[in-house]
Structures are given as structure tokens and as C-alpha cells.
Image (spheres, helix red, strand yellow):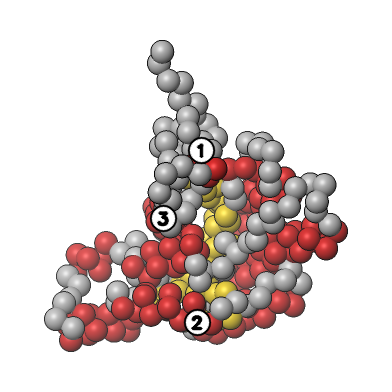
Amino acid sequence: MDPRVQNLCYEFWTSGSYFTSQELKDMRLQDKTALVTGSTSNIGRAIAVAFGREGARVVVSGRSASRGAEVVDEIRAAGGSADFVAADLDGSPASSAALADAATRALGGRIDVLVNNAGIYPGASTVETDEETFDRVYAVNVKAPFFLTAALAPAMVARGDGAIINLGSWIARLGIPTGGLYSSTKGAVETLTRAWAAEFGPRGVRVNAISPGVVRPERPEGGDLAELMMRGTPAGASGTPDAVAHAAVYLASDEAAFVHGTVIDVDGGRVGVAVIAAR
């Protein structure tokens, strides 16, 4: 039996609970290893926790060691396996390579799944955005996942197996009057997803993306701008990080073995559907 499975069984047995053999079999990411960038909060955290719940050994990564420790504790408390690796992805090849190396070592020499989730959102309008902000947003949102993928994909290709999941955004394909800089970076990420699927897919590495809509851990009382943006959609309100995590588990699992170069919209229907109220 895999030592990690033995560990899980022992931990649950000693705590008065246990996994049945069927439950272990049903873990969709059993025996896989995963690196999730920007996983100390919100969507990244939900993905890391979901991966741990599905049997993956996870590296939680971000700038805050204290928040990272909280995520690791949450995964371990549920019987999963996780470690924290600090990273400040500034877009430089060196920072991406350092994270790739540290995460690979933490995961025992192999990374099966990479989730490029880390990103920043500037609040300034186009005319208010200075060059420093422009460069920083592209560095974090585009250059960092580019060079991290460049660092990790060769080992996946050598094994003939792996999955890369990028995080896009609904506003990459639906224009709104704010967030032009951010949306352009997510458009770049979606383009890279298709290019990488063509580059790495024939050699066994699946590359796909998720495009979240308005997603927040908790919905505010009453209406606000974010909730107003979800009016006229089938969902009618914002979603939760867990909704995105479910899609990430699917794309990371063998269930998605025939899925390449796809962007899955997890946006409550915001991009593709307009609900017209009957008069």
C-alpha cells in the first residue's frame, strides 16, 4: 500500500474515524502531487483544500507563511497531505525557477499538477495606470505562470504525463468599463493555455484553464456592484471559491484525460447567457 494511504488510514483510525477501501478508491487525485500558486486565500485556497481532500499531496504556496500554515493545517486536519513553500512570484525567471525547485523537493521529486492561480488585480482605470503598475501586473499575472510552466513542463513531458491548469477570468471575454489591464492579462493566459496545449499535449501534458465569474467566499448583505454584475445571469448572484475548486479537481483528474486546450467557464452563465425577464 502507498505509504501516504497507510498514513491516512492510521490517522483516521487513531482519531476514531477511517476511510473505507471504497472511499480511498473514490479519491480522484490519489497518488498525485500538486503545486497551487497563490493558495493562501480565496480560490487558490479552495483548490488546494479540494486537492488534499481528493488524495493529492499538495504544496500550498504564497507570500504569507502564517496564512499558508492555516491552509496546510486545514488540509492535514481532514486527513490530507500538504506543505507550505513561500514564494513571491515577481515575474522573474529566477523566482519561478526557485519555486519550481523547492516545490519539487517538497513533493518528493515529482509534480503531477500545476495550478497557475496567483494574480493581482489593480483598481486603477486605464488613464490612471502608470507604467510601474502595468509592468507589475503583467509580471505577476503573465510572466510568472509563463516561466513557472517553462520550469516544470519539461519534467512532465519526460514522464509523458501531467496537467497544467491556468486561472483566467470572465472579463477576459466580456468587456466591462473597469479592469482593462487585468482583463488583458487574463486574455493572455487563456491564449497561452491553447498554445501550451498544442506544445505539450502531444507529449502527454494536458493544459486547460478555468474562467471564474464573480466569486467570493461570502456574499454581502444586500446588493453591491459585484452582485449587480451577476444580474441577468442564470445564477443571479456571485459564486463561491468551492465552485471553481470542483472544476480544478476535474481538470486535474484522469476523468479529464480527453480534455485539452479548453477554458471552462465557472461564472454562473455570465459570459454565455443572458436571462431576459418575461414581461
**Which of labels 1 and 2 is toward the front?**
1
Q: CA distance from mark 1 to mark 2?
A: 34 Å
Q: Residue at x 38, y 64 (%)?
A: 50
| Three-letter code, disc 3 | Glu
Between marks 3 and 1, how big is the CA–CA gap? 15 Å
The kind of residue tagged 1 is Leu
**Residue at left 46%, top 21%?**
276
Check residue 39 in the rendering and tell me which mark sits there, or answer none.
none
Q: Is residue 23 above or below residue 197?
A: below
Residue furthest top in the image:
279
Q: CA distance from mark 3 to mark 2?
A: 22 Å
Give x and y (percent) for residue 112: 50, 68
The answer to whether mark 3 and mark 2 are in CB contact below 8 A is: no
Mark 3 or 2, nearer chain start: 2
Q: Quadrant of residue 121?
A: bottom right
Image marks 3 and 1: residues in contact by CB distance under 8 Å = no
**Is residue 222 visible to us here?**
yes
Residue plotted at (54% across, 43% down): 225
Q: Secondary structure at mark 2?
A: helix
Q: Position of residue 271 (x, y in %)?
A: 55, 35
Q: Residues within 10 Å of mark 1 (few under 14, many from 20)?
A: few
Q: Is residue 17 above or below residue 190?
A: below
Q: Which residue is mark 2?
A: 66
Q: Mark 1 vs mark 2: which is more N-terminal?
A: 2
Residue tagged 3: 218
Name which of mark 3 and mark 1 comes first in the sequence. Answer: 3
> Which quarter of the image is occupied by the N terminus?
bottom left
Dot 3 surroundings within 10 Å: few (below 14), some, or many (20 or more)? few
Residue at the image position 47 percent from the left and 29 percent from the top? 232
Query: Which residue is disc 1 drawn over?
Result: 228
Q: Disc 2 marks which amino acid? A: Ser
In percent of width and height, residue 27 lies at 30, 64
